[in-house]
Image: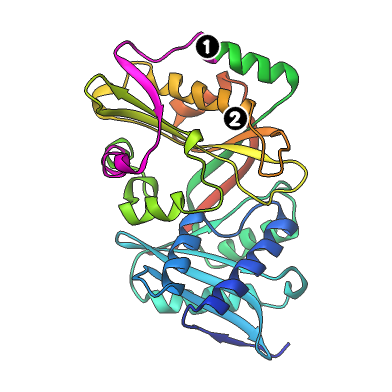
Amino acid sequence: MVYEIVSPKVSGAVLADFERLAELARRQDGASPFSEQTFVELRKAAAGADASVQLFEARQAGAPLGFAALVREGELWVLEAAVAPKSRGQGLGSALIGAAVEATGDEPLRAWVHGGSDTSSPALQAATHLADKLGWRPTRELYKLGLALTDEARASVRAVAQARPLPADLALTTYTPDRAEAWVQVNAQAFAHHPEQGRLTLDDLVARTDSDWFRAEGFFLAVDKDGQLAGFHWTKIPTGQGERPEGEVYAVGIAPAWQGKGLGKALTLAGMAYLADAADESSTPLERIVLYVDADNTAAVALYRSLGFTPLTIDRQYAPAHP
């Protein structure tokens, strides 16, 4: 196969090509090959705003065959890549990753391999094999857990949520734009040691609240009697999911002063109760609640397992042997 690797300026047309190929890969593999922040940064770049992203494209006769993206996270570059299903097995993934690695020079680098619903899939095996071939080592695992919303599960979620109210002196409300700065501050405090979530800026928040999937009614806030934000549970129902839609425990964060007081579990259950009765944009009831949690966050994993969640997939992050 004759192809070229280029690093295009991110335009609206390039972004559209990227999103189409990413969707093809998601449908084939059962998981998006790119994280949400990668899409956010590319959309910023396409709009002419400052963005911490570099893009690499494999193309043949002007047609995109694959992409690799580098997103800056603090001092790190984070790499993700995907090849169109019909163009796999011809070395494109290796070429894209090689171009991206070369562009980072001596700067620290991490790379994600996103697990699909089938851990034996050729795409996942090829990505893992390539990481091994490059001598990269796993540095982080991210679990995707799920809870099937049977009639029994829906009733159980509602009952458990009702039996676990918020701590005294706190009230449950939903997000409004005037709370944006307070949310960014509490989110940074709650996720101070989280490599992605804790870095979200006001622009990142606005990019998400401007998305077609955003529902303020599913963005729960716990506030004290003075109106100060104590914690939040942001749920997400992606659009365009098809016949078996899922709802996500997108982010649960607690202000330091309220940690260890049961607020996290109460907010988690409040959001789950909402998702248990929610539907997608075509009014199809959700079939499952999902969430992502770091494997080494054993307390959170134990909490979610106690609520009935079971493992679905594992995403692995790799680092060069000598970063």
Q: How far across and how far down the image is residue 66, in percent? A: 63, 74
The residue to which callout 1 is attached is 162
Say whether residue 72 is visible: yes
Q: Is residue 255 above or below residue 292?
A: above
Secondary-structure class at tag 2? helix
230 relative to 293 in the view: left or right: left
Which quadrant of the figure has residue 229?
A: top left
Secondary-structure class at tag 1? helix
**Residue positioned 39% across, 53% down in the render:** 206
Magenta segment range? 161-186
The quadrant in which the N terminus is found is bottom right
**Residue positioned 70% across, 51% down in the render:** 30
Residue in the foreground of this view, choosing between 167 and 216: 216
Q: Which amino acid type is shown beneath numbered disc 2? A: Leu
Q: How far across and how far down the image is residue 87, in percent? A: 74, 75
Label 2 vs 1, first from the N-terminus: 1
The residue to which callout 2 is attached is 275
Verify whether residue 288 appears in magenta. Answer: no
Q: Is residue 29 above or below residue 244?
A: below
Residue occupying the far top of the picture: 163
Q: How far across and how far down the image is residue 208, in percent? A: 45, 51
